[in-house]
Image: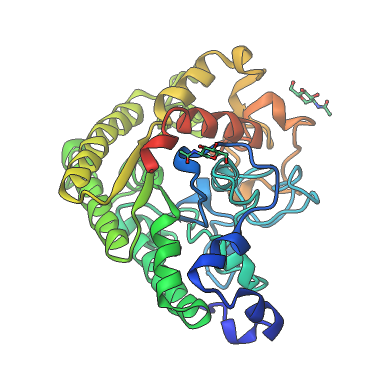
Amino acid sequence: MRFLSLESLPASSLLRVFCNAVIFFTLCQYNGAATTSLPFNETVPAVFIFGDSIVDPGNNNNNIKTVVKCNFPPYGKDFPGGYPTGRFSNGRVASDIIAEIFNVKKIVPAYLDPNLQLQDLLTGVSFASGGGGYDPLTAEFVSVLSLSDQLEMFREYKSKLKAAVGERSLEMMISKSIFIVCSGTNDIANTYFLGPFRRPHYDIQAYTDLMANSASDFLQGLYEEGGRRVGVVSLPPIGCVPSERTLNGDIFRHCSEPPNQAASLFNSKLSSLLDSFNSQFPQARLVYLDIYNPLLSIIQNPAHYGFEVATKGCCGTGNIEVSILCNSYTATTCSNASKYIFWDSYHPSQKAYEILTRLALHNKINKFF
Ligand SMILES: *[C@@H]1O[C@H](CO)[C@@H](O)[C@H](O)[C@H]1NC(C)=O
Ligand SMILES: *[C@@H]1O[C@H](CO)[C@@H](O)[C@H](O)[C@H]1NC(C)=O
């Protein structure tokens, strides 16, 4: 795996960031239109993202030998410039929108993007990898980056930035940054319900315990690396994504109940885990971000949110295509993805991400500070 080397950055960009703690934040501030007013007039210097395809801006494109990729059309057709980036949608994904809501920037790049500049690193990157999960087997099956790989990349990021800006600036920047963790859907949809290895040995109680224990280890690791303001995204109603309706729903393609029940069970464990973490570590601000209920509401009342299609994706038939099956050779694409909640059979459209992310963060921003 190839990682970005700071030594390759031009000296001028290193000079620009010199960075003593005082002017550090001024320089690193987002210059775009600030939209959210944050508590105590705080400025968030950076966002750091971990997890799966919901928040992967294209790490899987870069020297990762996996079929879980989407760096080809029609993915990205509504991204600025209209080109595929490796984001699993027609445009921006949840990580980009979260960074925008915290006034940091509009696009969060992939840590493995070989063209990153120092300024990109200073305002945050995503380490997420489509196809991964909390269960380490999930990433292993499809040869993508596990959460422990992602944490290792964050340690590497820190050692590079330490050389450029100094340890104290870096630590202060990290303690004020927003961390987002979004994982677990592939554990339930793929590893548990499709794969052969877990179901014979674990019932859903035991499997969601395994997931929650792994989430706990990861959050502990993030805390040890300095992460304090951490939003953890719940699981969605997995049984209602178009591919689950097709594979596991009834002939009318109703939502499949077992994955929805598993997701709810995990969510309640995750929520208590975050509560106990917050009482154990008074400096931590772990924030549970519910997407289960908002997404279900959007799916049940599409017209209320401006959508026309709730049960099929825009790409291809919309029933089954995802990743390599959604490409410009096999799949025709709907003309206006904004009418669809789902872009492919597994991932929301940009429009749905915009609505869902704002609903998930609604009334939650204060809890990070
Ligand atoms: C935030 O900034 C505004 C404008 O500078 C000021 O009026 C207000 O008192 C500040 N609020 C806090 C909590 O510091
Ligand atoms: C696409 O659909 C959305 C939602 O119905 C609508 O607001 C928008 O104007 C449409 N765009 C085009 C180019 O037709």
Near-viewer residue (331 or 218)? 218
Which quarter of the rendered picture does the C terminus lie within?
top left
The residue sitting at 51% across, 66% down in the picture is 22
Near-viewer residue (256 or 12)? 12
Q: Look at the image and name its color scheme.
A: rainbow
In the rendering, at what x and y percent does residue 173 appear?
45, 63
Taking 153 as reference, is 194 above or below it?
above
The residue sitting at 57% across, 77% down in the picture is 4
* Residue 49 in view here: yes
Near-viewer residue (168 or 222)? 168
Taking 241 as reference, is 33 above or below it?
below
In the rendering, at what x and y percent does residue 61 appear?
60, 64
Q: Is residue 304 found left or right of 181 in the rendered image?
A: right
Taking 164 as reference, is 256 above or below it?
above
* Residue 233 in view here: no
In the rendering, at what x and y percent does residue 222 appear?
32, 60
Q: Is residue 360 found left or right of 19 in the rendered image?
A: left
The residue sitting at 71% across, 81% down in the picture is 12
* Res 315 → quadrant: top right
Q: Quadrant of ligand 2?
A: top right
In the rendering, at what x and y percent does residue 102 appear?
54, 44
Taking 181 as reference, is 314 above or below it?
above
The residue sitting at 75% across, 31% down in the picture is 334
Q: Is residue 187 found left or right of 68 in the rendered image?
A: left
Q: Is residue 279 found left or right of 109 in the rendered image?
A: left
Near-viewer residue (17 or 262)? 17
